[in-house]
Image: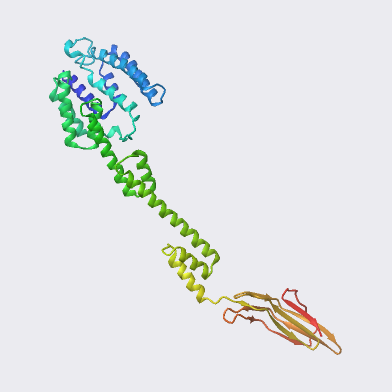
Amino acid sequence: MEESKNLRAQIHQLIAKNEIEQAFELLAGNQFTRLDKELIILNNRYNKVKEEVRMDVISKDEADKELNKINSALIDLSSKIESKPKVLKVVEPPKSQAIYYLIPIVLLILVGVAYMVSGSGTEPEVKVDQNELMNEENQEEIGEMVNEVTDEGIVTQDNNDVIEDKMWNFTLQKDDLESYEAYQNMFPTGRYIQEAQSKIQQIGEEKIWQNTIEKDLIDFYQNYLTIFPNGKYAAIAKSKISTIEEAEAKILQDNQDFQAATKTNTVEAFQKYLTSNPQGQHRDLAEANIKALETQKICHCPPKTFRTVSDHTWAEFRMPKAKMGSVIQIPEGVKNKYVFPKCNRTWWTNLVFSCDPNSCRWERISGNWDSDALCHGGFTPNKYLFVGER
């Protein structure tokens, strides 16, 4: 008798956790060998219906009909359960109580049906991990509560209402999501089910909203509206989304305007950026660029020719118009001409010319040129080098 009482208490705990498969396994492990096959077949039928509902293979009405058949079979099977498992002698319980031995299992089946066919309404369903609905302390309290009210854990029509009332009072004392979920699992059609479901909705919405405002990201606000389109904070969520979208659009435009100014790289371009984005995130950098450009003297050196001559030859180094900082190099060379009784030669070393940013004029940075009476050497053609005779 004590072993059977413990078995029923364990089943009550599994009901609170909505662990249907585990309840079947527990029941199967404590039955007579001759009932094993019947229980396995019945369990397979139940799992098949549950899977077909999940896959939308059958309608809700069809599922209800099949589950009613399974419920009847479970009740019939419950009349064959012994008070002491795994003993071959069959002891029938009193007829007035035999049908109630397996009511916890029937409740467990109804819970499964409620969860499978729920979600068809307009209000969003709060998803909770059923394996974490009740901690061990709460499970033990529920089991003790059932045993206190019932006679050896047997649920009857008379004490079922008392159990529900105690469970509801227990739920109100806890006043948390897992307790209301546990009540809903144990009494899916109970007298307080509407209030329990309302609390589940309310507490679930509050938790999701708190997480949403902590993240303060557009994806979280959109997720909240998907779950609670008419929720308590729907108007705030929509306003937050609009505010974030406007801010993101401003940031994008600000970046594009600054990139355009940087590409042009003029005082006018950066001033235009500041006018369009007076509080822009690149304001300090734009002002720094304007200051640098105004301080820096931008100029172009005009064309200039450098010339060296001898009695009968000449060489010119012609610099073009160019931006300040430009550099031109001309390799060393000579221009020869013999006029009796001696040679005439114009020569130059490796030359480097630069467009000076301070004077905006071409300057010779290194190298020399001159003339003499030697008769050897030549030059390498260069687009800036011109030579001739006189």
- In this image, 201 relative to 268: left or right? left
Q: Position of residue 236 (x, y in %)?
A: 32, 47
Which one is nearer the viewer's eye here, 155 or 252?
252
In the picture, which quadrant includes the N terminus?
top left
In x, y percent, where is residue 284? 43, 67
Q: Is residue 64 visible?
A: yes
Q: Residue at x 52, y 62 (%)?
A: 260
Q: Is residue 97 left or right of residue 329?
A: left
Residue at 52 percent across and 67 percent down: it is: 269
Identify which residue, 52 or 86, lies in the foreground. Answer: 52
Place residue 186 in its image quadrant: top left
- For the point 35% across and 38% down, the residue is 227
> From what the image shows, is residue 241 above or below residue 1?
below
Q: Quadrant of residue 58?
A: top left
* Relative depth, front residue between 313 and 127: 127
Name above or below for residue 167 compared with residue 321: above
Tell whether 234 sits left or right of 325.
Answer: left
Front in this rendered view, residue 325 or 369? 325
The spot of residue 383 in percent (x, y) is 73, 73
Q: Is residue 362 above or below residue 69?
A: below
Q: Examine the image and state in which quarter residue 102 appears.
A: top left
Where 319 falls versus 263 (above or below)? below
Residue 356 percent coordinates (x, y): 60, 79
